[in-house]
Amino acid sequence: MSLPTLFPRRRLARGLAALALALSPLACGASGTPGAKGPPGAEGRVAVVEVRDADFSGSLYTIVRDGKQSPQRTGLLIGVVRRQLAHAAARFHAGQPDRAVDSVLGALYLVRPGEGHAEMIDAVGERALAGAIERMSPRGDEGRVRALMELRAAALPRGSRARAEVDEHLAALDRWMKETRTGGPLEQLGMEQRASVSRALIDSRPETIQRAAAATAAWIDRAIEFNIEYRQGGKRPEREEAVEAARALESGGASMAALLLRYGDAKGALDQIDRTSARRVIPPGLYERIKAAASSDDAVSWQALATAFALHDTQERDAETGMLQDLLNGAIWGTALEAYRRDPLSYDSATLLSQVMIRLGMSEATPLVVAGALGDRPSPGALGAALGLLLGALSEEASTDDFEAARRTYSAAGPLLALADRAARGGAVLDPSGARVRSLMASLELRAGHLAGALPLLRAATAAEPTVNGLTLLAMAERQSGELQAALEDVRRALGAPDARTAPLEIIQAHLLAFELHREAGTQERAKESLDAALAAALDARQRARDPGTKARTERLLGRILDGYGDEKGATRAYERAFALVAAEPPQLGATMLDAVGRALVERDLPAARRALKRGLEANVDEEDLVYGGLWVLLLERALGVATDGTAGRALDSAANRASWTGKLAAWANGRLSDADLGKLAQSAAQRVETQFYTAMAKKAAGDAGADERLRAVSKSPVIDLLEVHLAREMLAPELRIELPRNAGLP
């Protein structure tokens, strides 16, 4: 039967039509109903498998590939959940709370009804849950917070102070939820539905899921009644009640389905829909797909269902009336997992599941998932797409400096890279290639300060795919390992790489690197040859550049070259032109500002440093750029014994109270943290090198004779992409008197 509408039909229909379009034509398929044993910890003890980091990728792969319950699988599942929660705890400790929360959810999403065990939460896992509770509490997500509190309480000894505190928090949360259930009847039902569903997403006990389903049914029932009352009475309803009714009518049916599908239970979803009013509001296309999955229980029907939810995730939804994002995410996970388990050789299913696992902080098994679906003779297109997914997984870990997770993921990619290498030897062109994957992993190893791990990867990548940029990076790494001749040979190869004609800026950088290497070796004539070549390449690139960004980068490189000749005025003019070119582009202006302030720090030119920093402040460049620029100006003022003019303070003040690393640097600069304090707060290799640099510079300004040796250690750091490493090297570099070529034709 059709429903009378609450609003003009077009508004409600638009949301329903969008979902119906996303969840339209069907295939056939089905579902296995997960077991239902009882609350976590009620199933008795099992032989727990201690999953180490080295075992995690393979163990996680085993768990997601096959969901059939057995005592052996249960023991492994407990170990995998423990290890995933340990990864979450490490992410909280590293100052990455959002990624850590995703990782906690990933651990709990692995658990289906009947699989929960108290042993899953050890002391480390309890800390991860505590971090998730702290992070999620301010968001008003009382459902998931309550579930996490209950899990945490179960992990703490009865009678302990910590357990008592959690119990007190639970009681306080219950009081708060009762006190905040205000508004009209439908509003209150909506709040109860959202809290119950959020809780059921991570509390796998059957009674919790059933409670959420009942709350969803009551919410839809009242919305239908409300709509009929409005149609019959004609009285304009309260806006909040009207919005809640629209939410239930638009997304209630799909929400009921998503709740059960989070656990891969298509039969349960169909049953709940058929015997409640959810049947009246669920989009027909979605209903038919659930029905197909419930009856056929095959890979095709589950993949159709998973694809429908994934497609809906990409579409714009009404923030007030659309399905909860967390619920949609849960449905995508549950359906993607079922589709994959029905056919692990399906590349589409493996890809979708891998994408969800990356989102949930479980990248480590994704190379095994996609490699297993490719077979022995994959097409170049499929293999390239798999390598692209691997690049995405590594990039996700790189975005939070989680080098250990990146290493676990890369280690699991051995079979995938073997397929790529074999295809490349056979002449296949892959996009991206295995060489690109190795290059990215090498850059992560360098960022982590692991030179020994980066060098073999760079050598392998550049042997398979020699590029100017790759060989220049290899040369920089060889230099840091003390192999100057090997570095010079790498530069020679870079200048003759196949892409040399299409990479003019990279060619300039290669020539500049050769100049620095010859300068370090004390071979002045060869240094001049390299600097002259860099100048010629820069002037040529300057003529060919078309867009402002490329022109500005060329001018900055030209400024560095002219500094090599000692032409300070020419270098200053080059930086002025660069500033003018990117005046309206804050990201490029920020990079230009840092180059200019860094150059002034090396040259001890305080007026130039202040001018450049003021430009950044006026253009409101990124806060991080301002902090580093402000630090360099402040250090230069101290080194010269000059009173500050306030410019550096303005740049630092915006971040001084932040918890970020740049906030800690700003606090140190303002005297609120000691050198020792800053050292303790530095968690990554890059942060430790920065700490070395700034504390050494402060000691140098104070007249410490040993400061230069500390700077020398910074200049040899394997974290070669840090500006601080470059600055330390330039400050300690031997002075060379190199004359500009006659008739150079400088602008």
Image (cartoon, grey):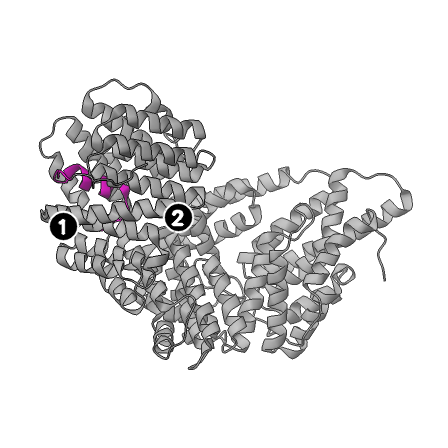
Q: Is residue 679 visible?
A: no
**Within the image, what quadrant is residue 488 found in?**
bottom left
**Above/below status of 418 relative to 242:** below
Q: Which residue is mark 2?
A: 544
Q: What label does residue 526 carry, if any?
A: 1
Task: Select label 1 or label 2 by which is in front.
Answer: 2
Q: Earlier in the sequence, mark 1 or mark 2?
A: 1
Q: How many marks?
A: 2
Q: Position of residue 611 (x, y in %)?
A: 34, 25
For residue 590, side relative to residue 606 (left or right):
right
In the displayed structure, 32 sits above or below 613; it is below
Residue 195 can be seen in this image? yes
Residue nearest the viewer, comparing 120 with 306: 306
Q: Secondary structure at mark 1?
A: helix
* Amino acid tagged 2: Arg
Find the distance from the CA under tag 1 to the CA under tag 2: 27 Å
Identify the secondary structure beneath mark 2.
helix
**Residue 287 at x, y percent in the picture:** 72, 67
The stretch of residues the image draws in magenta is: 718-738
Seen at 81% across and 39% down, the residue is 237
Q: Residue at x 21, y 31 (%)?
A: 603
The residue that appears at 21% across and 40% down in the rendered structure is 742
Residue 255 in the image: state x and y as whole percent.
66, 57
Q: Quadrant of the C terminus?
A: top left
In this image, 440 relative to 231: left or right? left
**Crowding at mark 1 (Cα within 10 Å: few <14, some 14-19, many 20+):** some
Q: Based on the picture, tell me whether residue 315 belongs to the magenta stretch.
A: no
- Identify the residue at horizontal 40%, vertical 46% (top origin): 545
Name the quadrant containing residue 179.
top right
Three-letter residue code for mark 1: Arg
Nearer to the camera, 474 or 8: 474
